[in-house]
Each structure stands twice: as C-alpha cells, then as structure tokens.
Image (spheres, rainbow, N blue to C red):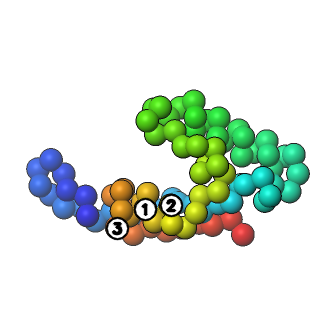
C-alpha cells in the first residue's frame, strides 16, 4: 500500500508489467540481439546512474527479481503481467 504525504493509503495496481528472457541463448538471431541491445541502451542512457541495471539482469528478468522489484521494494499491491509467449 502506498502512503501519500498526507497519510492517505492507496492500493496500487500496476497494469503494465512484463517478464522477459532476452538472454543471448534466447535470442533467435541477430535481430533479437539488436532488439534487446536497443532497449538496454534506452535504459542505460535515460535512467539515473543509481538505477541502471547490469546488462545480464536486463537481459533476463527473473521471477524472483520481478517480485522483489515490484512488491518488496516497489509500491505494487497487485500487478497484471503480460509475458511474451
């Protein structure tokens, strides 16, 4: 539950989350590598330096890391996951 500066509790539903595996062994061809490299470059260049992930974490976002990032360290109470199948 997120608590505002005024002490108001807000139930947070994250409606746009993804679980992905863009690791090198899951990249079908060079275009898969180009895709994940492009998105990592956006992340690396647009995020504050304290929030930049190592490339290995970005390539393969594990279930454990998602749970930790969204629910333990983040503000999500519920999330709608949209995995790529």
Q: Residue furthest right?
A: 29
Check disc 2 and report the residue beneath it. Answer: 65
Circle 3 Cα neighbour tier, 10 Å, few/some/many (<14 / 14–19 / ≥20): some
Relative image position of residue 84 (x, y in whole percent): 68, 65
Relative image position of residue 63 (x, y in whole percent): 55, 67
Picture residue at 45% right of the left edge, 65% below the top: 67
Q: Specify the quadrant that holds the C terminus.
A: bottom right
Q: Are marks 2 and 1 in contact (CB under 8 Å)?
A: yes
Picture residue at 75% right of the left edge, 45% below the top: 35
Relative image position of residue 11 (x, y in whole percent): 28, 65
Q: Quadrant of residue 40?
A: top right
Mark 1 or mark 3, earlier in chain: 1
Q: How many marks?
A: 3
Disc 2 is placed on an element classified as helix
Q: Are marks 1 and 3 in contact (CB under 8 Å)?
A: no
Up-down relation of residue 46 to residue 53 (above or below): above
Disc 3 is placed on an element classified as loop
Q: Nearer the viewer, mark 3 or mark 2?
A: 2
The circle drawn on residue 68 is: 1
How far apart, in angstroms, are the residues tagged by discs 3 and 2? 16 Å
Up-down relation of residue 29 to residue 53 (above or below): below
Circle 2 Cα neighbour tier, 10 Å, few/some/many (<14 / 14–19 / ≥20): some
Picture residue at 63% right of the left edge, 44% below the top: 55
Check disc 3 and report the residue beneath it. Answer: 77
Circle 1 Cα neighbour tier, 10 Å, few/some/many (<14 / 14–19 / ≥20): few
How far apart, in angstroms, are the residues tagged by discs 1 and 3? 12 Å
Mark 3 or mark 2, earlier in chain: 2
Picture residue at 18% right of the left edge, 51% below the top: 4
Disc 1 is placed on an element classified as helix
């Amino acid at each position: 539950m997120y608590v505002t500066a005024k002490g108001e509790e807000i139930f947070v539903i994250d409606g746009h989350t993804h679980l992905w595996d863009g690791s090198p062994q899951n990249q079908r061809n060079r275009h898969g590598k180009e895709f994940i490299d492009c998105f990592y470059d956006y992340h690396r260049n647009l995020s504050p330096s304290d929030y930049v992930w190592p490339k290995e974490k970005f390539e393969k976002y594990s279930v454990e890391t998602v749970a930790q990032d969204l629910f333990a360290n983040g503000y999500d109470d519920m999330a709608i996951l949209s995995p790529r199948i």
